[in-house]
Amino acid sequence: MALFERLIPETDQRDTLERRAFGWRTVAHGFLRSRRRNTRRILEGQPVYSDWHHPWLFFLAVGTMLFSSIDAFLTLQLLDRGFYEANPVMAGMMGHGTLTFSVAKMMLTGFGVLTLVFLSRHRFLNRFRTGLVLTSIFSFYACLVCYEFVWLIRDL
């Protein structure tokens, strides 16, 4: 028993700082020095979730959010000129005011973009990666903004 008592330290000599604590330093470190880009084992196949995403996904995500903001602004401009909102969900939000419309549009688009980036390596219907869906949404928003801009110029 005396031997066992000598092996157990009387006081805990570890640092009081918990290394596994989560904070902004953890987020920055994980963003700048992400490690999991590939699989750990040969049998795993393609990794579904990873710490690192291709820069193209960042471009698509930021571009989609930017086009969504421009779309909201142009939609409000066109509504002031007598046009109507074709999307029934956004038309319902417009009934509650422009602030509600704008916040709902940004939140819905942001949640969708974050989900698609997170699941970018998944296969949709076992055919194509969901990153392709984000590319399609980006292209759709680009065309929609051009369409609204043309109608705005025509109405001047």
Image: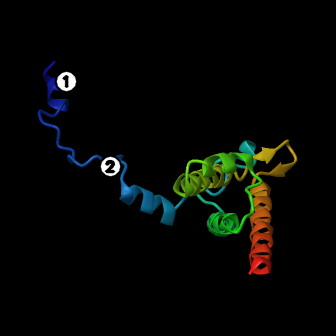
- Residue 103: quadrant of the picture: bottom right
Image location (x, y in percent) of residue 114: 61, 53
Choose the circle earlier in sequence order: 2 or 1.
Answer: 1
Residue 31 visible? The answer is: yes
Q: Furthest residue to the front?
A: 82
- Judging depth in this view, the residue of 131 and 52 nearest the camera is 131
Q: Is residue 11 above or below residue 152?
A: above
Q: Which residue is mark 2?
A: 19
- Residue 80: quadrant of the picture: bottom right
Q: Along the horizontal axis of the image, is 42 left or right of 12? A: right
Q: Furthest residue to the top?
A: 1
Residue visible at 21% across and 44% down? 14
As helix, strand or loop, the secondary structure at mark 1 comes to: helix
As helix, strand or loop, the secondary structure at mark 2 comes to: loop
Image location (x, y in percent) of residue 29: 43, 61
Q: Look at discs 2 and 1 and give the one toward the viewer.
A: 2
Residue visible at 16% across and 18% down? 1
Residue 48 visible? The answer is: no
Query: Disc number at residue 4?
Result: 1
Q: Tag 2: residue type? A: Arg
Image location (x, y in percent) of residue 17: 24, 49
Image location (x, y in percent) of residue 150: 79, 77
